[in-house]
Amino acid sequence: MIQIIPSISILGGKIVRLQRGDYSNEKEYAESPVDLAKRFEDHGIEVLHLVDLDGAQRSSPINYHILEAINGHTNLKIDFTGGIHTDGDISKAYEYGASYITAASISVENKELFASWIISYGREKITLGADALDGKIAVSGWQRNTDIDLFDHIDYFYSRGLKYVKITDISRDGLLQGPNFKLYQEIIKRFDGICVLASGGVRNVADIDRLNEMGVFAAIFGKAFYEDHITLKDLEHFLVKQ
């Protein structure tokens, strides 16, 4: 069964959603990060994707205090991401309550360092953030495009032990137009045994059902929930203990 992972994105201490990573096109939500995380947990959610948008902009995590607060008030496993560039960043993330980290920009800027993390911290603890626009990797909170091919990028780390990869088709993020199913299918086919965390474009439960049927490891969703296209009750059949 596919893992269901809600996303909370933090900017300036508030929950926000962006469209296609555009910081000038943000929508703020009134609920506190801790209260929302507790609601997720109360409905059977076990893992939370916590995005430090401030950290992504500044290439250094900022919102450790929110990570700490959610960890202190819930038993959720937290996947923390946003600006992680050093071993010190990872150590602090774990210290403040992260169970896993996802890193993206550093995998472009220092491939050898990120590859070493897969070994030193363990492949269960490190997720590659491979977010792409038109098949090319984008970094720095999606503010900087590269000429790096998405499949080549994944392959480099897959051959070095990578197990988990979070993939976002940036063109679909925050638009509620549906995931890029073809892309996820191709990645699963090409990289045997890799665990794909699909992010971006989820509109409804039917999209999650389709990702599940394809063999996607996890669905990360945000705007569909915040805009009431998906309710926590809708997700109950995914959260029943097997």
Image (cartoon, rainbow, N blue to C red):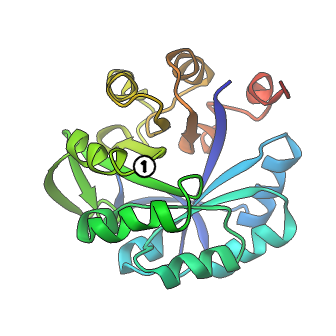
Q: Residue at x 42, y 29 (%)?
A: 179
Nearest the viewer among 192 and 94 is 192
Q: Residue at x 74, y 26 (%)?
A: 238
Label 1: which residue? 161
Position of 82 compared to 77: left or right? left
Number of marks in the image? 1
Position of 147 compared to 221: left or right? left
CA neighbours of label 1 inside 10 A, class few (<14), some (14 to 19), many (20+): some
Residue 140 in view (yes/no):
no
User: Residue 71 location, x and y as percent?
Assistant: 78, 68
Q: Residue at x 36, y 44 (%)?
A: 158
Nearest the viewer among 116 and 148 is 116
Nearest the viewer among 184 and 153 is 153
What is the quadrant of the N terminus in the image? top right
User: Residue 154 location, x and y as percent?
Assistant: 31, 45
Residue 177 in view (yes/no):
yes
Residue found at the far left of this picture: 147
Residue found at the far bottom of this picture: 88
What is the quadrant of the C terminus in the image? top right
Residue 160, compared with residue 194, is above or below; it is: below
Residue 193, compared with residue 211, is above or below; it is: below
Residue 175, compared with residue 122, is above or below; it is: above
Which secondary structure, mark 1? loop
Residue 39, compared with residue 200, is above or below; it is: below
Residue type at the position of mark 1 = Gly
Q: Residue at x 50, y 32 (%)?
A: 202
User: Residue 25 location, x and y as percent?
Assistant: 37, 58
User: Residue 6 location, x and y as percent?
Assistant: 64, 46
